[in-house]
């Protein structure tokens, strides 16, 4: 775990809330009682094992149950070993070595989701190894986090790493020719604000997405920043070092693949925030099955050629085409504008105070007034209302129709048909599917002239074809460096 900053840096961290639990014992300790000697003996005082059993039991019950959580199998409030709750049934001797070890061993798992823990506790290993809290304590912490965030007029922002904020690739996946180009870039870049990193000890190259520093600085003013990557813990910590060397941005709030659920999917539960005030930036919508309404999907950042091949976009990486995203008009700049607008809507007087509703409202305005007819995009044997292109267009506020009518404003085409011929005669916009994607990624109605349909550009774009590949790639990254 990265070093935990002092509480003077801010008051919204889980560590501060857990410290309050120890000092104030909310919901358990009686007002005016002293802290337990059992949990933290004073110098020269009797140890836990030396105290009479009856007195010990009385003092424990003064504070717990319920137990708010455990660190390494020991209650963070009263000091009772977790396994002692089960020992009351007479299965193991209280305080036995076997009992203590089992308590620590069972202190892992997200409400039992990975099969290693129980169904009553939430594991928070990304904060500290062996830390888990009860369902009740998790809800209390979420409520307290929400109240403090609202007072500070901040929301919570969860950031994916790979293909969202940066792109990493193994050195073994870089050709000798490309390696020479990359070393040349290293020599030329600014030492004060490097964008490319040669991480020899990780056998890895990492490239920041243009505009990343400006984005994080601006976003921090409106959001408490969290990271959730499907890379392993070592990779997550290394990226934290180069993204946030001072520790002032994320403050240790970095979750990795070990914090995902048993299906290797991401879940907001582990981050102890309220779903109605958390925004997610991720290139892969499919890894958030329970929280799609919270996601701002990012256009996938592909700098290195090997990953472009993996996502079915061979020849389209920035190294292959030359150049890079524009920091001022690229994906992160667009995303910040959406974050800024959704933040303002959330805190507007009389607002719904549900960020999911704010995002849905903003999204539904993008193509408001447009009527879309699809041509050779949706197969005949598929329920058109379930097809990703139809769903996306509806989310963006467009009206979708199956047949030719005067109300049609746009024909989104994947091939030439009688529909496109009719559209040309009537002067309708005839655009490729990339236009629809661009509107979704930029959260603006893009200029149709830049996405005119032709037989060479009309094929279905990677978002629709390769979303399943993206989910599998994210899963494959779990348990290893991305």
Image (spheres, grey):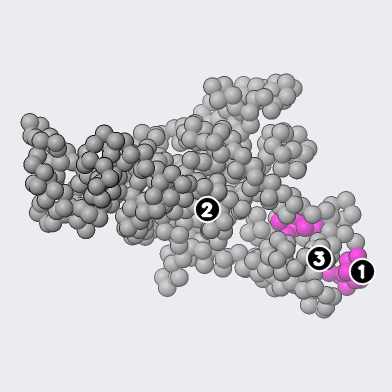
Q: On residue 280, which mark appears?
A: 2
Q: Secondary structure at mark 1?
A: helix
Q: Percent position (x, y) of residue 469?
A: 69, 46
Bounds of the magenta span?
417-437
Q: Residue at x 43, y 64 (%)?
A: 347
**In this view, 76 is above or below 190:** below
Q: Percent position (x, y) of residue 300?
A: 65, 45
| Circle 3 residue | 381
Distance from Cα at disc 2 to Cα at disc 3: 34 Å
* Callout in the foreground (3, 1): 3
Q: Residue at x 33, y 53 (%)?
A: 134
Q: Residue at x 50, y 48 (%)?
A: 261
Distance from Cα at disc 2 to Cα at disc 1: 41 Å
Earlier sequence position, callout 2 versus callout 1: 2
* Callout in the foreground (2, 3): 3
Q: On residue 336, which mark appears?
A: none
Apparent side of residue 166 relative to residue 306 in the rendered image (left or right): left
Residues under numbered marks 3 and 1 in contact, where contact means CB atoms less than 8 Å apart: no
Specify the quadrant of the image occupied by residue 434.
bottom right
Distance from Cα at disc 3 to Cα at disc 1: 19 Å
- Membership of 421 in magenta stretch: yes
| Circle 1 residue | 418
Q: Secondary structure at mark 3?
A: loop
Dot 2 alpha-carbon crowd within 10 angstroms: few under 14, some 14 to 19, many 20 or more: many
Compare residues 190 and 74 and report the one nearer the observer: 74
Q: Percent position (x, y) of residue 457?
A: 84, 52
Q: Quarter of the image containing the N terminus?
A: top left
């Amino acid at each position: 775990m990265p070093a935990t900053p002092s509480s003077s840096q801010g008051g919204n961290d889980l560590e501060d809330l857990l410290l309050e639990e120890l000092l104030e014992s909310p919901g358990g300790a009686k007002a005016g009682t002293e802290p337990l000697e059992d949990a933290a003996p004073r110098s020269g005082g009797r140890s836990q094992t030396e105290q009479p059993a009856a007195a010990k039991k009385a003092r424990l019950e003064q504070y717990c149950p319920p137990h708010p959580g455990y660190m390494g199998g020991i209650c963070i409030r009263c000091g009772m070993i977790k396994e002692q709750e089960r020992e009351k049934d007479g299965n193991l001797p209280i305080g036995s070595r076997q009992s203590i070890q089992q308590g620590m061993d069972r202190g892992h798992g997200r409400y039992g989701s990975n099969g290693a823990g129980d169904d009553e506790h939430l594991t928070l290993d990304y904060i500290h190894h062996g830390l888990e809290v009860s369902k009740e304590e998790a809800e209390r912490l979420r409520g307290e986090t929400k109240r403090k965030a609202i007072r500070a007029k901040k929301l919570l922002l969860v950031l994916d790493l790979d293909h969202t904020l940066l792109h990493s690739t193994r050195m073994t996946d870089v050709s000798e020719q490309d390696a020479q180009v990359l070393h040349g870039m290293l020599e030329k870049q600014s030492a004060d604000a490097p964008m490319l990193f040669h991480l020899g000890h990780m056998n890895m190259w990492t490239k920041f997405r243009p505009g990343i520093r400006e984005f994080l600085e601006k976003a921090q003013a409106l959001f408490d920043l969290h990271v959730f990557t499907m890379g392993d813990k070592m990779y997550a910590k290394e990226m934290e070092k180069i993204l946030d060397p001072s520790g002032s941005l994320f403050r240790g709030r970095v979750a990795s693949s070990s914090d995902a659920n048993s299906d290797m999917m991401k879940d907001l539960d582990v981050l102890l925030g309220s779903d109605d005030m958390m925004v997610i930036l991720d290139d892969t919508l499919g890894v958030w099955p329970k929280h799609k309404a919270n996601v701002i999907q990012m256009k996938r950042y592909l700098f290195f050629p090997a990953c472009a091949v993996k996502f079915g976009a061979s020849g389209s990486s920035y190294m292959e085409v030359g150049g890079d995203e524009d920091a001022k008009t690229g994906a992160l700049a667009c995303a910040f504008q959406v974050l800024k607008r959704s933040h303002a809507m959330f805190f507007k007087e009389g607002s719904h105070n549900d960020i999911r509703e704010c995002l849905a409202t903003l999204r539904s305005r993008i193509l408001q007034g447009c009527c879309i007819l699809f041509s050779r995009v949706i197969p005949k044997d598929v329920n058109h209302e379930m097809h990703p292109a139809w769903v996306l267009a509806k989310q963006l506020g467009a009206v979708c129709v199956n047949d030719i009518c005067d109300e049609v404003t746009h024909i989104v085409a994947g091939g030439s048909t009688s529909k496109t011929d009719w559209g040309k005669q009537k002067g309708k916009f005839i655009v490729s599917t990339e236009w629809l994607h661009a509107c979704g990624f930029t959260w603006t109605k893009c200029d149709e002239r830049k996405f005119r349909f032709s037989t060479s550009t009309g094929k279905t774009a990677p978002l629709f074809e390769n979303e399943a590949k993206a989910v599998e790639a994210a899963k494959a990254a779990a348990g290893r460096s991305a």
